[in-house]
Structure formats: structure tokens, C-alpha cells
Amino acid sequence: MPHSNPAKAVMNKNKKEALLQAAKELFGECGYVETTFKKISDKAGVALGLLTHHYGNKEKLFLASGLDVLERFLVRLRAATAEATCGYDGVMRFCKAYLDFSIDKDSNWLVLVRCSPYSDMKTKTDRDIMDSMFSQVHSELERVIAKGVEDGSIVKVDSKSTAQVIISLMVGSNRTRVLTPYAMPTLYEDVLDFISRSIKA
């Protein structure tokens, strides 16, 4: 009977994590097209063959990178809304957590900004997996908007369409801040003020 080797298992896990971290950084810096398996293995200091063994192809690695960032993003959003005193407070906490995560240097957020989960994903299955994760972001915001309408802290609005408008503001302001040279220093604060004025009862 073969002996298991815990030290080797830990080493392989560490190498797999190093590859994923290198991939997230490179996808964020270089975009999907310019990021190669060789660049990733070089950055991680791991053999190219191990990268293929763990992830198969670049698309699977991109999916793993995007899902890793999205899962941590959802945890941050849900933790923020869990502390809310009312629906309005939940929306504002959600928006602040969204914007803060987008400029957290350790979040690898640029994976989702520089690489499109919609155009860079080649298979419907992979797109569906990513869509499902993104829809959870919308659902969390819809939930706190509906709560705010119900508890009277938010004006009477349709929670689904209002969530889409707010998410659009988040995406647009984030892309303006991280991808363009002309963002005002107070852009994120101004966006939060605008949302507050728009929804507060």
C-alpha cells in the first residue's frame, strides 16, 4: 500500500497557490491575451508542467483566478451588509465595500477589470459559472434595497432595476478610477454621496 506524503501534499498545495496568485497578478497587469503560461510559471517560480497539471489550459486558470477574486469579493460585501442597521445603511455599506475592495492592492481586482469574463471566456459552461457568481453580487444589493424600501429608510423604488443602476455606477466609477488618468481624487466619495441622495427616504 503506498504511503501518503503530507509534506509533498503541502508543497504541491503551496505551488498551486503560488501559480494562482501569479496568474491573478499577471491577468490584472497584462490582460488575458498577453498573459502566457510561461510568464505565469516564471513569476511563480514553478515548472511549466506543473501549471498544466493543475489547471489544464489558460482559460481554466483564468476562470479559477476570476472565481477566487469574486468569492473573496462576495465575502467582503456580505460581511459589510451584515452589519447594517437598516436597508439604507446596507446599501451604503455595500457600495463602500465594493469601492474599497476595488482599490485594495491585495484584492487582485484588476483580474475582473482588465479581463472580460464575457469576452475572454470561450465556453458557455465557464461563462455560466462566472455569470452565477456575478448574479450573487446583484442579489445581495437587491436584498438590502428591498429591505430599505420595507423598513422605510429608502424611497419607494424597484429593487431589481435600482440595483442594476447602482452596480452600473460602481462599475463605471471603478473603471474611471483605475483605468483612466482623469478621475477626480474625490470620485468615490462623490459617487457614494450621489447614491445616498438618490435613495435615502
Image (spheres, grey):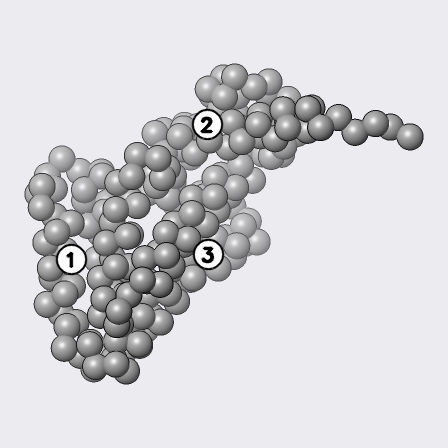
Q: Please identify the quarter of the rendering in which residue 27 is found.
A: top left
Q: Is residue 97 left or right of residue 181?
A: right
Q: Distance between the Cα atoms at labels 1 and 2?
A: 33 Å
Residue shown at the point (22%, 39%) measured from the top left = 178
Q: Is residue 172 left or right of residue 15?
A: left
Q: Is residue 37 left or right of residue 10?
A: left
Residue 22 - label? 2
Say what amino acid the circle numbered 1 marks: Leu
Q: Position of residue 49 (x, y in %)?
A: 64, 22
Residue shown at the point (12%, 48%) measured from the top left = 187
Count neighbours of disc 2 (C-alpha within 10 A) and say few if under 14, some if 14 to 19, many if 20 or more.
Answer: many
Residue 66, visible in the rendered structure:
yes
Residue shown at the point (39%, 67%) measured from the top left = 139
SS at circle 1:
helix
Q: What residue does disc 3 label? A: 133
SS at circle 2:
helix
Q: Distance between the Cα atoms at labels 2 and 3?
A: 22 Å
Q: Position of residue 99 (x, y in %)?
A: 25, 49
